[in-house]
Amino acid sequence: MAADGQLVTVQKVEPASNPVQDEDLEQYGEDLSGLTIVDVDVHVDDTLMYMLDYMEGHFRKRMETVLQADFKGEPGNSLRNMIAHIAWLGSSYDKPPRAKLATKEDLLARMEKGIIDYSILFPSELLPVGYLPEPEWAAALATAYNQYMVDAYNNLAGVKIAIVVAPQHPDRAAEEIDLHAAHPDVVSVCIPDVGVNPPIGDEKYRPIFEAAARHDLPISFHGIEALIHDNYPLRVAHFHTLMQVNSMGFPFTSMLQIMSVVCAGIPVRFPNLKFAILEAGLTWMPFIMYRLDAAYLRYRTELPALEKKPSDYIRDWYIGTHELEALPRRGDLVKLIELYQGHETTMWASDWPHLERDLIAGFMRYEMDDELRRKILGENALRFFGLTPRK
Amino acid sequence: MTPDKQPSLRSRSRRKIPVAPLHDFPPGTRMEVKVGSVQIAVFNVGGDFYALYGRCPHQSAPLSRGRLQGTVICNAETCWKTEWAHDGEVLVCPGHGMEYHIRSGKAFGYNLRLRTYEVVVEDGQVKLVM
């Protein structure tokens, strides 16, 4: 006890060997208790070694070869690192420490704290699947991932799964949706949107949207650093640092895919299909909505299928908060959300346990009324994924 | 209360808070101290004690759990060449990696300085001065 009566505690601590995760959930436990909390972007260890048992024939043989390749330092080898991070390996001097992959036990321990009601699992390893030049190989990986996830993570309280599709093979993607849509723990179709060329509004992808609409399964676009693009959407060869690629890759890809989907009239053809964008932050939303509106005045005749202006469609898209931008003032997030009219569509996302994950403190620091906070932390996500409240 | 009995602002702001006996706080260790609601990270780096505000301004991660390492600098003094510097004196936030110079609290690359606190050793006791 200090002289002025303040409680003093002293605790010997050790440097964290892994990035601090969500210890702050307890810090905010009182504020969060009673609220429905849905973390709409959660990742578990889905490295390629888990896919092996789900592959057959020559693709299994190929996976065995992949798993023998020596990419040092990565457990079970990493598709992400094989095609991506190697270019910038070590550029952050291991600062902060590398994110540990979350095991099933890690996930369950996080859920058992009783603060988060639902975790929506998205792929890690297969996020770059859109890069792969061979449609059959990409589709085989997606098939293996989906079956592994459904087998390993089914029937866990509060744990739901987004299956992944390889967009370069639309027919196989539609088959995956048909196969898994009825599973009670499958709540969304994830389209890894980076590297997808042509953009996702192209006519060739129509089977994916038809299948999702047929099963009333919402589509979530999830980005990854635009790591090896030499053309679309950015010529990353122009950038010398991973930071530039990371900063631009997610929002640029998201803007391009939203623009592509809306301008192709997909929301008109599939009016009940719901869309979300994850891991791209929020600040670009007003830009793409109102920039397109301005151009629409001049070029509407290029988009005769649209029945209203682009922002009227984009406003219906859901959006995950991660990677939440650090806006300078505590009232700024509400102002931003007002600009893109996202009160009913903004969903809290952590990206746990990845390196760039958001601690909940990053969201709680912003001032907003209780109703909006409740919607963003859980209610909007319940509606998007078709979930029932757990408390 | 007569003016001479009023505690001066200086004396009120110079509270000494015991952290640990010196022998329990050897070089290479750190303590997380909470004074009321304020969290402070106290380090023994090679026999010198440093205390800084213990929550990262970015997303509140506890700085007491950060690693101490070096970092890269590039400025006029290095003739704009990138050099590894401040080895062992850079506190890396365990949340997302913001870096602070442990001596000054200055954040590398940000116009930001964490509050620092004086640490004294008196009668074999490490004390935080607030």
Image (cartoon, coloured by chain):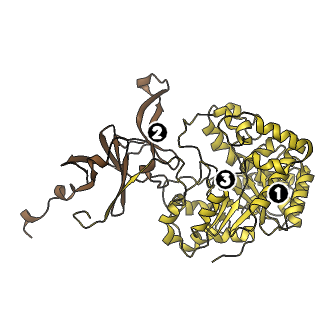
Chain colours: A yellow, B brown
Q: Please tell me if label 2 and label 1 are on a single chain.
A: no
Name the spot of residue A296 as percent of width and height, x first. 78, 54
Check disc 3 and report the residue beneath it: A279
Check disc 2 and report the residue beneath it: B109
Along the viewing direction, whichever of B74 and A90 lies nearer the viewer? A90
Rendered position, A295 above or below B74? below
Dots 2, 1 in contact, CB < 8 A: no
Q: Chain of mark 1?
A: A
Q: Badge 1 local density, few (<14 within 10 Å), some, or many (20+)?
A: some
The amino acid at mark 2 is: Gly
Q: Residue A137 falls in which quadrant of the image?
A: top right
Dots 3, 1 in contact, CB < 8 A: no
**Residue for point 91% across, 52% down:** A172
Q: Is residue B7 visible?
A: yes
Check disc 1 and report the residue beneath it: A147
Name the spot of residue A356 as percent of width and height, x first. 59, 49
Rendered position, A80 above or below B81? below
Rendered position, A42 above or below A58? below
Along the viewing direction, whichever of A267 and A7 lies nearer the viewer? A7
Task: Report, in whole angstroms, how far the alpha carbon at label 3 lies from the one at label 1.
Answer: 24 Å
Q: Badge 3 local density, few (<14 within 10 Å), some, or many (20+)?
A: many
**Quarter of the picture holding the N terminus of chain B:** bottom left
Q: Earlier in the sequence, mark 3 or mark 1?
A: 1
Q: Badge 2 local density, few (<14 within 10 Å), some, or many (20+)?
A: few
